[in-house]
Image (cartoon, helix red, strand yellow):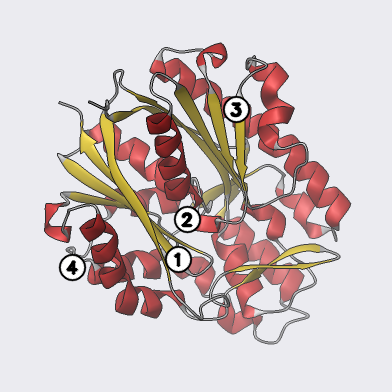
């Protein structure tokens, strides 16, 4: 009989520079106000985003100068590797393992380009074995934390006895653009932060949760909802359609389908653990899933303290839910470019 895949540990890491939302709003006004007539109207998002502070790999003044691909890539490589090592070591320590115990490492990141990939750049400092299997994953955006967990769980199940390390690193602040006088850029400036999370999984072993199932849903004709535009200056955020109304209208049947294929119903889920893309997205999630308004409390707190870090954000929420005590059955849920939904079902360990 196949042993269940256990989530053995979850850990998070954030960079040292703290960006207070009120300070970001003031700097954004100085940088955009004189050049962008619509800024005053759009600037309300800084106060309504539900964010108190965020973390960044660079200090505030770094963003006040024009930056192109070379500068952004250098910042990404240095910052992402540092966060990778920090989150990975914390997860390994929590699982009672060291880097040489890991057989496969899954690295999820969509906010920079690294070849060799991040786990190769971190390998010597981490102490990975030379025969470790590497699975770098790019392009999943905000859904990457949940999809990455699902990929790691499938790899652990396929190789009984192996230990899999998932590391999710996103440096969203590097997408800040001085040159783009657009609503999407102002919203991104008000929302994005940097962070990393790591998980250790194995088929068998001890841990607080079992990964019971996972799945995704890809909506047709939705490529323009979320993603990156790429130009000589770097990544530029794409928010071409309003996400909260789409979530409220379309998420529930997608989640029902994902759960149904695994033999579950929404009523079987005691707690949804969601990616908090923003206050309006959280509210739309609560309505779509028929949760009481305010139910996604850890989501609101993580958003307030860290902003939207893209893929690792849902794992920050999971870490808090685990600390509080995982209910019998939980479902992680996140939305990402494609436009897509990703879901993973967790059962509390007996």
| Image mark count | 4
Nearer to us of marks 3 and 4 is 3
Q: Residue furthest front?
A: 1
Quarter of the view holding residue 81: top right
Q: CA distance from mark 2 to mark 4?
A: 21 Å
- Residue at the disc numbered 3: 133
- Residue at the disc numbered 1: 340
Q: CA distance from mark 2 to mark 1?
A: 8 Å
* Sequence-first disc among 3 and 4: 3
Q: Nearer the viewer, residue 327 or 137?
A: 137
Q: The residue tagged with tag 3: helix, strand or loop? A: strand
Quarter of the view holding residue 3: top left
Q: CA distance from mark 1 to mark 3?
A: 27 Å
Q: CA distance from mark 4 to mark 1?
A: 20 Å
Quarter of the view holding residue 178: bottom right
Pointer 3 with pointer 2, Cβ within 8 A: no
Q: Nearer the viewer, residue 218 or 294?
A: 218
Pointer 2 with pointer 1, Cβ within 8 A: yes
Residue 224 lies left or right of residue 234; in this view the side is left
Q: The residue tagged with tag 4: helix, strand or loop? A: loop
* Sequence-first disc among 2 and 4: 2
Q: What's the residue at 70%, 59% (across, down)?
A: 175
Q: Residue furthest bottom?
A: 37
Q: CA distance from mark 3 to mark 4?
A: 41 Å
Residue 215 drawn at (x, y percent)? 36, 54
* Sequence-first disc among 2 and 1: 2
- Residue at the disc numbered 2: 143
**Marking on residue 290:** 4
- Confirm whether residue 238 shows in the render: yes
Mark 4 residue crowding within 10 angstroms, few (<14) / some (14–19) / many (20+): few
* Sequence-first disc among 4 and 1: 4
């Amino acid at each position: 009989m196949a042993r269940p895949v256990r989530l053995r540990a979850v850990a998070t890491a954030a960079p040292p520079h703290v960006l207070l939302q009120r300070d970001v709003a003031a700097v954004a006004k100085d940088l955009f106000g004189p050049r962008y007539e619509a800024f005053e109207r759009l600037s309300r998002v800084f106060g309504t985003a539900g964010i108190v502070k965020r973390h960044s790999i660079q200090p505030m003044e770094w963003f006040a100068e024009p930056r192109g691909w070379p500068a952004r890539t250098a910042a990404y490589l240095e910052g992402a590797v540092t966060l990778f090592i920090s989150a990975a070591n914390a997860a390994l320590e929590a699982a009672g393992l060291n880097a040489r115990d890991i057989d496969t490492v899954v690295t999820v990141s969509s906010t920079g380009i690294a070849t060799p990939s991040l786990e190769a750049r971190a390998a010597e400092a981490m102490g990975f074995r030379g025969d470790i299997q590497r699975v770098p994953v790019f392009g999943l955006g905000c859904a990457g934390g949940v999809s990455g967990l699902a990929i790691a769980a499938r790899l652990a199940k396929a190789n009984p006895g192996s230990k899999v390390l998932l590391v999710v690193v996103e440096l969203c602040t590097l997408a800040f653009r001085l040159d783009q006088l657009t609503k999407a850029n102002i919203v991104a400036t008000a929302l994005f932060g940097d962070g990393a999370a790591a998980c250790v999984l194995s088929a068998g072993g001890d841990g607080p949760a079992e990964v019971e199932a996972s799945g995704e849903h890809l909506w047709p004709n939705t490529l323009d909802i979320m993603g990156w535009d790429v130009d000589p200056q770097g990544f530029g955020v794409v928010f071409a359609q309003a996400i909260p109304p789409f979530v409220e209208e379309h998420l529930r049947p997608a989640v029902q389908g994902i759960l149904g294929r695994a033999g579950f119903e929404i009523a079987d889920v005691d707690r949804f653990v969601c990616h908090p893309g923003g206050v309006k997205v959280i509210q739309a999630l609560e309505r779509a899933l028929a949760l009481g308004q305010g139910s996604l409390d850890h989501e609101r707190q993580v958003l307030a303290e860290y902003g939207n870090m893209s893929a690792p954000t849902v794992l920050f929420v999971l870490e808090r839910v685990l600390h509080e005590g995982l209910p019998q059955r939980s479902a992680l849920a996140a939305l990402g470019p494609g436009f897509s939904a990703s879901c993973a079902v967790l059962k509390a360990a007996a």
